[in-house]
Amino acid sequence: MKVAVFSTRSYDRQFLDLANKELNSSHELEYFKTQLNPKTASLAKDFPCVCIFVNDIADAETLKILAAQGTKLIALRCAGYNMIDMHVANELGLKVVRVPAYSPYAVAEHAVGLILMLNRKLNKAYNRVRDDNFTLDGLLGFDLHESTVGVIGTGKIGTIFAQIMKGFGCNLLGYDVYPSEQFKAIPGAKYVELPELLANSDIISLHCPLLPSTNHIINEKTIEQMKKGMMLINTSRGQLVDTRAVIEGIKSGKIAYVGLDVYEEEEELFFQDYSDSIIKDDTFQLLQSFQNVVITAHQAFFTRNALTSIAQTTITNINSWQQGSELTNEVKVSGKNQQK
Ligand code: NAD
């Protein structure tokens, strides 16, 4: 089957081609480097399947173009489906499949990496030694042992993250609208309401999906309730955080460390090379300018294991649809449950 694969890099091609071969599928995968949006949707003319990633734009306008051109299936190479207007997809009869889980370890481990980098200032230390400067001034950290870590969203990734932090000897607080048995099973882990988590955590890590109820869950009011000198980690979705409020929190000293793998307006920036041009997003530039902020460009998922799993599930999803088998990874939501 003809599949138009958007937002692709060399690694997407490598892993998808391999999965297509290993699963004895013979899909004609046509790779486009460009993002899917209303302007690029015409590239997918006569492709029954369109395959997209986190920063593609499958809004109402794009979906209508795709449906009119013959697309029937949208295969997401990710778990989150906030980039697609599910209400319109349902109306147009477009089937949407996703990769509900690939390597939760990849994302959880990256969150831990950000914590270690911020705490022990590894980014600065590395550059300092490269510069033959062996002083320690300004590199002071704190023991993770016995610090309190708040986990917002204790699903697959949040629970693994909590298990790793338990290994460091941290106290664990969790907040979730659907508490999980796996999180409860971690010795000492405790579910609390959000205000208690905010008030008592030295480190807060976000692992909930982007929904209307979680949009800007970190905002001026929630920041006010946090412990002074806390660390904020977001490897989930950029819009969980009101970036302007976080900047004010940094300036006031309330937030002492920020580690981000996602950014509110990342669609324009991430996965692109702007090293030879000017970034016009003032908020991003201001955020970057702080010494106590570390940003990575949505790379938490980026391990060999995760890419293998994403590619295999994506090809399997496409095979199931083509063969008329049950779509176990179908996104089935009404407009009400739409991820933002
Ligand atoms: P999951 O569905 O297993 O867990 C999400 C948890 O959030 C669930 O337990 C759910 O009950 C909880 N939740 C929902 N609404 C909530 C609310 N209002 N308050 C608190 N908790 C709430 O998902 P997962 O596999 O653990 O992934 C979590 C998120 O990580 C994804 O939604 C995605 O946004 C993000 N993610 C990021 C990357 C990356 O590369 N940076 C990769 C994969 C996933």
Image (tube, rainbow, N blue to C red):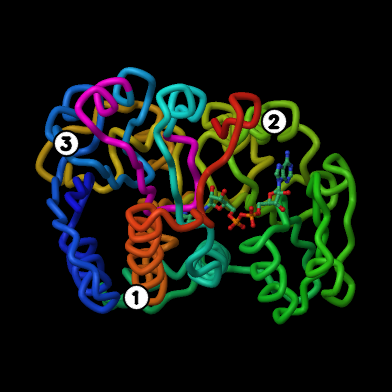
Residue 168, image x and y in percent?
70, 79
Residue 65, image x and y in percent?
25, 22
Q: Amino acid at mark 1?
A: Arg
For marks 1 and 3, give the one nearer the viewer. 3
Residue 196 in the figure: left or right of residue 306: right
10 Å crowding of disc 3: few (<14), some (14-19), many (20+) = many
Instruction: Report the Cα–Cα distance between label 2 and label 3.
Output: 34 Å
Residue 272, image x and y in percent?
21, 45
Image quadrant containing the C terminus: top right
Query: Which residue does the image show at 44% across and 61% down from the upper left?
Result: 300
- The region drawn magenta spans 64-83
Q: Is mark 1 within 8 Å of ligand 1?
A: no
For residue 91, above or below residue 304? above
Residue 164, image x and y in percent?
66, 76
Say which residue label 1 marks. 304
Say which residue label 2 marks. 213
Q: Earlier in the sequence, mark 1 or mark 3?
A: 3
Say which residue label 3 marks. 44
Query: Which residue does the image show at 57% across and 40% down from the upper left?
Result: 332
Residue 228 in the figure: left or right of residue 279: right
